[in-house]
Image (cartoon, rainbow, N blue to C red):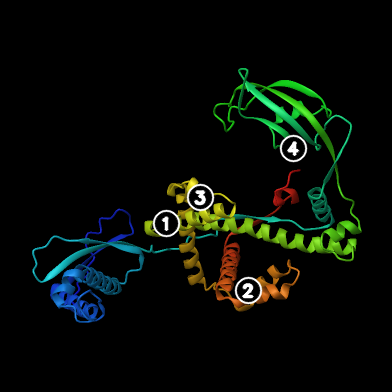
Amino acid sequence: METNAANTNEQAVNALERRLDLTVAIADLDKDVDQRLKRMGKNIKMAGFRPGKVPAGIVKQQYGDQARHEALNEALDRAFGEAVTTSKLRVAGYPRIEPKTTESTTHLEFAAVFEVYPEITLGDLSAVEVERPVLEVGAAEVDSTIDILRKQRVKYEAIDRAAASGDRVVIDFLGKKDGEPFQGGQATDYPFVLGEGSMLADFENAVIGSKAGEAKSFDMTFPEDYFSKDLAGQTVTFEITVKEVNEPRLPEVDADFAKALGVEDGDIAKMRSEIEGNLKREVKKRLQSRVKEQVMDALLKATPIDVPNALVELEIQRLMQAARQDMEQRGMKSKDFPMQPEWFADQAKRRVSLGLILAEVVKVNDLHAKSDQVKNIVEEAAQSYEHPEEVVRWYYAQPQRLAEIEGVAIEDNVVAWALASAKVVDKAVAFDELMGQKS
């Protein structure tokens, strides 16, 4: 087979698009088709003929188009591979093959249109300022975490007084707009905790001060940006009946509380020690995540690159598939919620850009993961489990699992390299703000 490849017509849709001319000899193609049909003829079963004895003319009539299609695709794949190797091109995605109109009786001509990976010149980070959040975990942070754990185990008891913020109430309510009930404005035995924001503030304020058994009505205006356009900015009337007022009761920090958290002997000092260890690991992870995000932003800004559309499209499909799987796991049916590729376009472009830049950083600076580094990450992750040694074995049992940890190690190496190059400013961060907790 003869092939001819040349860079031609590089007037492209984007800076990374290339075009190569491919030529396939008709004689070689016909020879390949004949060989394929002969192989098919040996295995074809057809009524009226013994296996392998179907006449060649019938085989060609039935399977000639298939054989030619397969032969041509294989010839073009081979021709394209030889062409990009000769031209030393790094192809991104798959080529689009376009037939040419020619008068030749000996050759078929095609054009392969495709994208290549960008040439990357890493930017200078020396002038970039990276803010590194700092937080030391101490007794105050442990106390704050214990308070949260207590609130997660809160119990409510009925009380004969007016409802206040923090109480859980059970109510019936009916909302009317212009004297008529509106959709979503009615419920019976509806429970919620005052002050948690599950209801609009004006609604909660109308409930506060009411006792069990009391009924009242009040007017309320929905916010202009309310999600329901029919109600946004509209004034309605609610009728409510308070059926229960329950006061929160937090568990005491005692042996029973410690046992509930997994400390079998109920030792409070041991409980605090375990909470502190887990908290330090979580705080470290969140601090590292914030620094990493800044480093990634800095790399993107310092090293602008053209991104192959083919890779972005592939990433969009991966993100969409992940979103569908997440919906299914949450009990939703993704087919009832059609997704649009443009929703994921910006995220996909960022991920592809970062992937290309990070690969270049790793290659240029030899930042590949080391075995002891991977081991340390695995062992640290395993510490938050009851049987760390089993978790370590689980990671090392499958290369794919370990590959994920290697990816984390490489990112850590890139962050360390970037911090050594950039201007790093340490800044204290509040515990509640880092953990995303309400003050």
Name the residue at 49% across, 46% down.
336
The image's mark for residue 293 is: none
Residue lying furthest front: 48
Left or right placement of residue 23 versus residue 402 in this view: left
Q: Is residue 231 above or below residue 427?
A: above
Between 86 and 82, the residue placed more toward the observer is 82
Rounded to the nearest angstrom, the CA distance separating label 1 from label 2 is 30 Å
Q: Is residue 78 above or below residue 138?
A: below
Rounded to the nearest angstrom, the CA distance separating label 1 from label 3 is 22 Å
Residue lying furthest top: 178
Callout 1 touching callout 3 (CB < 8 Å): no
Residue 239 horizontal/vertical position (percent): 71, 23
Callout 1 touching callout 2 (CB < 8 Å): no
Left or right placement of residue 112 versus residue 165 in this view: left
Q: Nearer the viewer, mark 2 or mark 3?
A: 3
Rounded to the nearest angstrom, the CA distance separating label 1 from label 4 is 44 Å
Name the residue at 81% across, 25% down.
214
Q: Earlier in the sequence, mark 4 or mark 3?
A: 4
The image's mark for residue 192 is: 4
Q: Nearer the viewer, mark 1 or mark 4?
A: 4
Rounded to the nearest angstrom, the CA distance separating label 2 from label 4 is 42 Å
Q: Residues within 10 Å of mark 3 (few under 14, many from 20)?
A: some
Inspect this view and state whether residue 255 appears. yes
Q: Which residue is mark 2?
A: 395
The image's mark for residue 334 is: 3
Q: Residues within 10 Å of mark 2 (few under 14, many from 20)?
A: some
Left or right placement of residue 117 versus residue 272 in this view: left
